[in-house]
Amino acid sequence: MSQPTTFGAREDQESIDESAVFCPKFDADGLLAAVAVDARTREPLMLAWMNEESLRRTLDTGEAVYFSRSRQELWHKGATSGHTQKVRSIRTDCDQDAVILYVDQETGACHTGRRSCFYREVTPGDPATLTFVDDGKTFDPEKVYGGKG
Amino acid sequence: MSQPTTFGAREDQESIDESAVFCPKFDADGLLAAVAVDARTREPLMLAWMNEESLRRTLDTGEAVYFSRSRQELWHKGATSGHTQKVRSIRTDCDQDAVILYVDQETGACHTGRRSCFYREVTPGDPATLTFVDDGKTFDPEKVYGGKG
């Protein structure tokens, strides 16, 4: 058995910013924000949440495991759809309360079938209206999530 | 006087996912996550938070205005340092509870002086340890934030 993954203790701001100790900060709900970015194209794919256990499992398994705020449970991305994210590298920010996962995304990241969840852009001069910048489906969500058989 | 910027009403999931109505969702604290990405290099620069007013001001002024969770106030990025972010475009995700800002970043985004806040990577096989992937300073934080004179 290998050692369980543990994180460092958070000390003063200078050490959090400038040391090589990974000491992630989880918010009052026990979560931090995680952005998945396509490791090849650098396209942002999705933004989700991780609790300590999901970050640990991501590090241990090499596949993205988030925490679903709506279902309040661990969420191994792609476990039902097959659209897993193989994690190539992980970065954290200065205060270590957010991470970026550079991933190889199988098929598409978005439950709508698109490659990225960020498929709409705010329209310049008309901020109440969105413009679709990607309307291509990588899979049929009905087939993947829709039925029982 | 121009009309104040308003957002759409959130209806059912299908309409939130698939319509062209911008209806951002703010969490229980009134916030959504905002990722600033360099419009030219596509490098993620920082992750911060916006309340409704900061999103509105960002749209109205064309410069990134966040909400500081620690200071509990609007935060016009670069107002003191001069390191503003000119917003080139904004994308939202399927459920509209996160945004990406593609920005022209003046000098550096990070308070440590670096271009991006994501300057450290989790070390493969040693997840308690970070590796610096960018240690170049774009400015001297002591000079910008340090003194009164």
Image (cartoon, coloured by chain):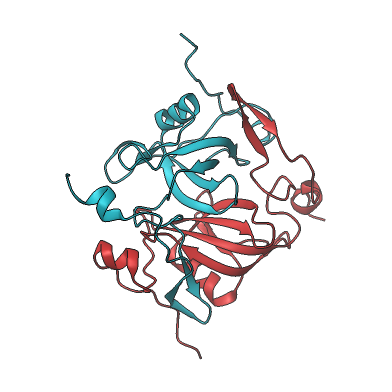
Chain colours: A cyan, B red
- Drawn side of residue A8 relative to residue B30, left or right: right
When the figure is inspected, residue A100 is found, relative to residue B37, above or below; the finding is above
State the image quarter where residue A43 is shown.
bottom right
Residue at the extreme left of the image, as rendered = A148
Residue A103 location (% of width, % of height):
53, 41
- Drawn side of residue B135 relative to residue A86, left or right: right
- Please state the total of marks drawn on the protein image: 0
Residue A92 location (% of width, % of height):
59, 39
Residue occupying image coordinates x 53% and y 33%: A24
Q: Is residue B79 visible?
A: no
State the image quarter where residue A83 is shown.
top left
Q: Is residue A32 visible?
A: yes
When the figure is inspected, residue A84 is found, relative to residue A115, above or below; the finding is above
Residue occupying image coordinates x 45% and y 63%: A119
Residue B103 location (% of width, % of height):
64, 64
When the figure is inspected, residue A118 is found, relative to residue A8, above or below; the finding is below
Q: Nearer the viewer, residue A72 or A63?
A: A63
Residue at the extreme bottom of the image, as rendered = B1
Residue occupying image coordinates x 77% and y 39%: B135
Residue occupying image coordinates x 36% and y 59%: B95
Residue B58 location (% of width, % of height):
55, 70
